[in-house]
Image: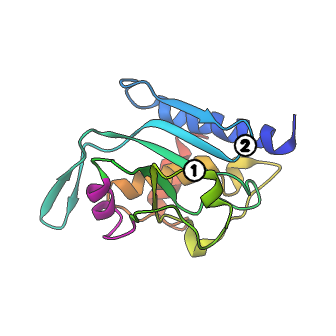
Amino acid sequence: MSQKRDLLIEDLGYVREFLNDFSQEPKREIVLDKNLDWVILKNFPLPDSFQNGFRKVQFAPDYEDILLVTTQYPNCGPWGIHIKKDSPNDVAIAQALGGGHVYGGVMGGRTSDYASVVDKDWKWVCFHTDNQSWNFNYNNLRAGDCLWKYIITLFAGFQGKFATKQEKWFDDELSIFR
């Protein structure tokens, strides 16, 4: 096996642990592309709702298929996610992430290989790590940036929270998985 495949398998194992904390209805799956170019998290859990100012915003349904492009993993992390073009949650996702952030096409600015990996059935959601940095730790995945932390932060974003690696609640959230 390649180093990239080994690291992705380990990292996605941690993502699976996170997903196992949620109801398994509908069935949650992780689909890894045979070329290691993308990962789909089928039926990724969304919070039932979140508070947007004085307004409560509902996700319906409370799950979403999410595509992560991994062409440059582990050297670079995801530069956002993709959701299905016909997602009924696109407006709620945009509101949870502070308005905007959901775009009609695939991401094309940072890496030109996105368009070749993601088909036309997906739209891009801008969501990236602090200061757009990615510090992967080859010796201890959980000690550096990894897909597992990215997914936990994404879930927090869907709750209307903007996590940074410096926030105490983010460390508390991660501590239950250590």
Q: Position of residue 29 (x, y in %)?
A: 52, 29
Residue at point 33% right, 54% down? 159
Please give the name of the residue rendered at 41% of the width and 54% of the height, measured from the top-left corner.
Answer: 156
State which region is magenta. 90-101
Residue toward you, 125 or 62: 125
**Residue that appears at 65% across and 56% down:** 116
The number of discs equals 2
Question: Residue 95, which numbered label?
Answer: none
Q: What residue is disc 2 on? A: 36
Q: Is residue 164 left or right of residue 109?
A: left
Q: Is residue 80 above or below residue 16?
A: below
Disc 2 element: loop
Q: Is residue 72 above or below residue 126?
A: above
The residue identified by callout 1 is: 68
Q: Nearer the viewer, residue 130 or 6?
A: 6
Q: Of the residues shown, which amino acid type is indicated by label 1? A: Leu
Mark 2, other Cα within 10 Å: few <14 / some 14–19 / many ≥20: some
Question: Could you tell me the amino acid type at mark 2?
Answer: Leu
- Residue at the spot 73% in from the left edge and 54% down from the top edge: 73
Left or right side of 56 for 71: right
Classify 10 Å Cα crowding around label 1: few (below 14), some (14-19), many (20 and above): many
Residue 172 shows in this picture: no
